[in-house]
Image (cartoon, grey):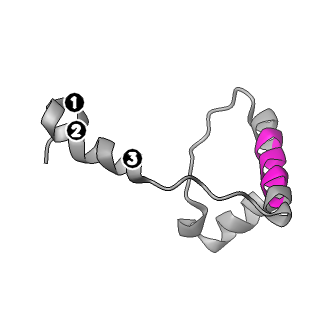
Amino acid sequence: MPTALELTREGWKPYLEAARRRPAPSELTPTEQSERARLLAHVREAEEIIGDRLVDLIEIETAGESLQRAIERY
């Protein structure tokens, strides 16, 4: 399978057509909006804590139990 850089105009057509057919995202409920705002606030806070430190991004579901607890503590 070619990479995106290797695709021709014809090769891009299926992807462009699929993107056009994609349904618009549904409106969030008030509960979902609140949860989203809460999560975004946590992300902003974490970015401030991290600052200029080097970090590794991990997938929390695949982290070990002790690492998950440490992440939740901070």
Q: Position of residue 46 (x, y in %)?
A: 78, 43
Mark 2 belongs to which amino acid? Answer: Trp
Between residues 63 and 4, which one lies in front from this camera angle? Answer: 4
Q: Residue furthest top?
A: 52
Of labels 1 and 2, earlier in sequence is: 1
Residue that badge 3 annotates? 19
In the displayed structure, would residue 60 be above or below residue 46? below
Residue located 81% across and 37% down the image: 49
Measure the C-alpha gap from mark 1 to mark 3: 18 Å
Question: Secondary structure of the magenta portion, mostly?
Answer: helix
Residue located 39% across and 45% down the image: 20
Mark 1 belongs to which amino acid? Answer: Leu
In the displayed structure, would residue 23 be above or below residue 48? below
Residue located 31% across and 46% down the image: 17
What numbered label is drawn on residue 5? 1
Mark 3 belongs to which amino acid? Answer: Ala
